[in-house]
Image: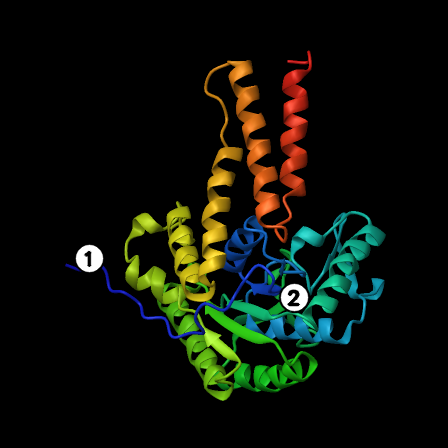
């Protein structure tokens, strides 16, 4: 007996390895998937402008990467003691204007280079609602908690989003002929829009994405993260305490579906082996038996060294450095 409604996934099967380069843009769900890809050492850049939510803002930022044009101080504004950019998440904001601009451009330049060579671009839409500046109509990626009177809020139509993205994809494919694009719609519910408003927003995103996939059937795929959470996991226990974001269990489940869909068997085998190493590295002793823990850390170092020998492409330098530092601490007289 089936206890859920399985979602069929029509997508390119078993193509991705640890040698493929990826970029992710989009909402916090893109951050969840990006964190997993980084955890398993895929060469990936996640949200070089910070978390983004709507297709219009993401399109503008990708165009900026295609041009490679650095940001200037004139594109920043000050509110209180912080400098901000309307193109960036507040994680880029800073009290020092020069440092704010520096960290923005430090992320832009390598991201622009990667976009021209990436194998996969993964885009996660969060909402079709946008905020535009009241004085010039420009869509902003982040309002930075400025007064509501500074903005006009409206919903993008399916045609409007398609008219932005169809020519942009053509230019992207000209820039990078190997590039494939995967779309997802975030299962995170935007409850500030109301339950009905959230569904209307997601419906517009789904219709728009379907049109793009039909226009570029050989270059674009849709991964149904939205449907997996809403249909297969149809239960509030798969949501976080805010009842809007998916729980860690839901993220694990979607990650497994994503892995089974896009990774080849060898890649999945490497990931399973690495997951066991990660589990050991994250272990912390429950008792103050220092000698036992020291031996355990030594075993972890051996596991990492063996893993590196077996998979030369898999860079475990950071984990080895941390484990050796921990071992040195345990062997010192500081504890």
Residue 150's tag is 2
Image vertical order of residue 191 relative to residue 199, above or below: above
Residue appearing at x 77%, y 64% in the figure: 109
Residue 3's tag is 1
Q: Which residue sits furthest left? A: 1
Can you tell which of label 1 and label 2 is closer to the viewer? 1
Write down the quadrant of residue 165 in the picture.
bottom right
Q: Secondary structure at mark 2?
A: helix
Structural distance between the alpha carbons of marks 1 and 2: 49 Å
Q: Nearer the viewer, residue 73 or 332?
A: 332
Question: Would you say 266 lies left or right of 297 here?
Answer: left
Q: Quadrant of the N terminus?
A: bottom left
Q: Position of residue 214 (x, y in %)?
A: 45, 86
Q: Give the colour scheme shown.
A: rainbow
Dot 2: few (<14), some (14–19), or many (≥20) neighbours within 10 Å?
A: few
Q: Quadrant of the C terminus?
A: top right
CB within 8 Å, label 1 to label 2: no
Residue appearing at x 84%, y 62% in the figure: 73
Q: Earlier in the sequence, mark 1 or mark 2?
A: 1
Image vertical order of residue 180 relative to residue 323, above or below: below
């Amino acid at each position: 007996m089936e206890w859920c409604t399985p979602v069929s996934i029509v997508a390119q099967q078993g193509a991705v390895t640890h040698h493929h380069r990826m970029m992710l843009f989009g909402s916090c769900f893109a951050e969840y998937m990006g964190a997993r890809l980084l955890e398993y050492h895929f060469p990936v850049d996640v949200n070089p402008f910070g978390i983004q939510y709507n297709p219009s803002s993401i399109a503008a930022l990708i165009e900026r990467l295609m041009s490679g044009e650095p940001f200037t101080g004139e594109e920043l504004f000050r509110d209180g003691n912080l400098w901000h950019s309307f193109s960036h998440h507040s994680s880029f904001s800073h009290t020092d204007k020069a440092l704010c601009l520096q960290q923005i451009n430090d992320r832009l330049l390598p991201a622009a280079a990667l976009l021209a060579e990436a194998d996969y671009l993964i885009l996660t839409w969060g909402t079709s609602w946008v905020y535009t500046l009241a004085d010039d109509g420009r869509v902003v990626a982040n309002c930075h908690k400025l007064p509501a009177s500074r903005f006009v809020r409206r919903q993008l139509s399916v045609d409007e989003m398609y008219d932005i993205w169809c020519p942009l994809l053509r230019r992207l494919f000209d820039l990078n002929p190997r590039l494939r694009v995967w779309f997802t719609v975030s299962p995170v519910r935007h409850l500030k829009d109301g339950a009905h408003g959230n569904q209307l927003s997601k419906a517009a995103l789904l219709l728009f994405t379907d049109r793009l996939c039909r226009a570029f059937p050989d270059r674009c795929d849709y991964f149904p993260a939205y449907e997996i959470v809403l249909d297969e996991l149809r239960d509030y226990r798969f949501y976080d305490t805010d009842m809007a974001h998916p729980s860690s269990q839901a993220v694990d489940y979607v990650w497994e579906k994503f892995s089974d869909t896009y990774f080849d068997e060898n890649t999945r085998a490497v990931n399973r082996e690495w997951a066991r190493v990660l589990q050991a590295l994250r272990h912390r002793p429950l008792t103050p038996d220092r000698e036992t823990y020291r031996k355990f850390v030594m075993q972890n170092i051996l596991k990492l060294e063996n893993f590196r020998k077996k998979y030369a492409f898999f860079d475990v330098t950071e984990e080895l450095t941390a484990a050796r530092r921990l071992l040195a601490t345990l062997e010192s007289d500081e504890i």
